[in-house]
Image: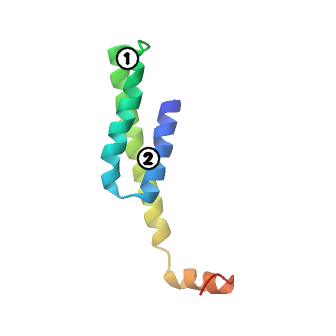
Amino acid sequence: MLLALSALTLGAMLGLRFTGYVVLPATGCALVVAGAGWFSGDDTFGSLISKLVLLMACLQLGYLGGAALRFSLKSRDPFQARWRRTYFGWPR
């Protein structure tokens, strides 16, 4: 459960900041980190595969959610954003 929530959070943070090309290196790094449990002798091969599939799916779903949030934040009306900046005294 902690692995899934961590992957969702990491994917959302990556989706808010980067484009889609960052998903592959992030997935590779996450697989290496998650696969370290198998080398320590804590997991069987079947549980390792299920954890890796869960990790990849949650990372990609989190990225999709973060990218959708980034898109929805950028698609606001520019007039409203300009009004907010001038009304609240932000840099003009």
SS assignment at label 1? helix
Three-letter code for the amino acid on which mark 1 is drawn: Phe
* Residue 29 spot, x, y in % from top left: 36, 37
* Residue 10 spot, x, y in % from top left: 47, 45
Q: Which tag, 1 or 2, sits closer to the chain's start?
A: 2
Residue in the image at 41% along x and 12% along y = 41
* Residue 57 spot, x, y in % from top left: 37, 38
SS assignment at label 2? helix
> Which quarter of the picture shows residue 35?
top left
Q: CA distance from mark 1 to mark 2?
A: 25 Å
- Here the colouring is rainbow
> Which quarter of the picture shows residue 82?
bottom right
Q: Is residue 8 visible?
A: yes
Q: Residues within 10 Å of mark 1 (few under 14, many from 20)?
A: few
Position of residue 50 relative to residue 91, above or below, is above
Q: Are marks 1 and 2 in contact (CB under 8 Å)?
A: no
Residue in the image at 35% along x and 40% along y = 27
In front: 86, or 1? 86
Q: Is residue 51 visible?
A: no
Identify the image quadrant of the C terminus. bottom right
Position of residue 57 relative to residue 81, above or below, is above
Q: Residues within 10 Å of mark 2 (few under 14, many from 20)?
A: many
In front: 83, or 13? 13
Three-letter code for the amino acid on which mark 2 is drawn: Gly
Q: How many marks?
A: 2
- Can you tell which of label 1 and label 2 is closer to the viewer? 1
**What number is the disc on residue 51?**
none
Q: Name the residue tied to disc 1.
A: 39
Q: Name the residue tied to disc 2.
A: 11
